[in-house]
Image: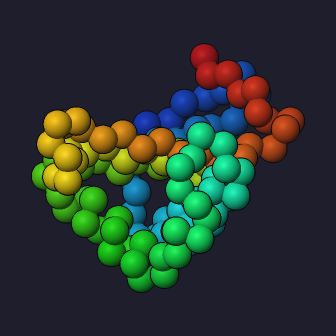
């Protein structure tokens, strides 16, 4: 199971970005973010109706990611609001690709969409 020490970054707008491992408490926010991302239909092959996970299923997925020896699940938050996630791991279904990266980010309010970190 891959773990990182939570990392904080300060933006030029004096906002704190925290990158850390996901946990069960993130389940509801992750589901809401994925709904938002899928509704945009930008760069996604997945239809919103295909992602119909319950809170319990999301919690189980997070736990399975955190317990798998070759997977990593990270979240990013600004001002305690989850704004993104990254999951990385080996693809057992298709070994020819070796590793799989999935990156998602939620909509950031327009006034903060140009956050630059020092």
Instruction: Please state if 70 lies on the left or on the right of 26 as rendered.
Output: left
Residue at the spot 52% in from the left edge and 68% down from the top edge: 50
Q: Is residue 47 above or below residue 69?
A: below
Residue at the spot 29% in from the left edge and 47% down from the top edge: 72
Instruction: Please state if 16 lies on the left or on the right of 76 as rendered.
Output: right
**So how many labels did they put on this image?**
0
Tell which of 13 and 99 is nearer to you. 99
Within the image, what quadrant is residue 42 found in? top right
Toward the top, the furthest residue is 118
x and y percentages locating residue 47 in the rendered image: 58, 61
x and y percentages locating residue 20 in the rendered image: 41, 47
Tell which of 100 and 28 is nearer to you. 100
Q: Is residue 111 above or below residue 28?
A: above
**Residue 88 in view here:** yes
Q: How is the image coloured?
A: rainbow
Tell which of 48 and 78 is nearer to you. 48
Tell which of 77 and 39 is nearer to you. 39
Locate the C terminus by quadrant. top right
Residue at the spot 76% in from the left edge and 26% down from the top edge: 114
Q: Is residue 41 above or below residue 34?
A: above
**Residue 5 in view here:** no
Toward the right, the furthest residue is 111
Residue at the spot 37% in from the left edge and 47% down from the top edge: 87
x and y percentages locating residue 91 in the rendered image: 22, 48
């Amino acid at each position: 199971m891959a773990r990182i020490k939570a990392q904080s970054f300060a933006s030029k707008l004096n906002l704190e970005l925290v990158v850390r491992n996901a946990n069960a408490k993130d389940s509801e926010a992750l589901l809401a973010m994925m709904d938002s991302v899928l509704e945009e239909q930008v760069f996604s092959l997945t239809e919103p109706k295909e992602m119909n996970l319950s809170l319990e299923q999301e919690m189980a997925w997070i736990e399975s990611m955190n317990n798998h020896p070759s997977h990593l699940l990270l979240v990013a938050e600004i001002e305690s609001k989850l704004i993104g996630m990254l999951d990385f791991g080996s693809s057992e279904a298709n070994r020819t690709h070796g590793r799989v990266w999935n990156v998602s980010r939620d909509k950031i309010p327009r006034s903060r969409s140009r956050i630059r970190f020092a």
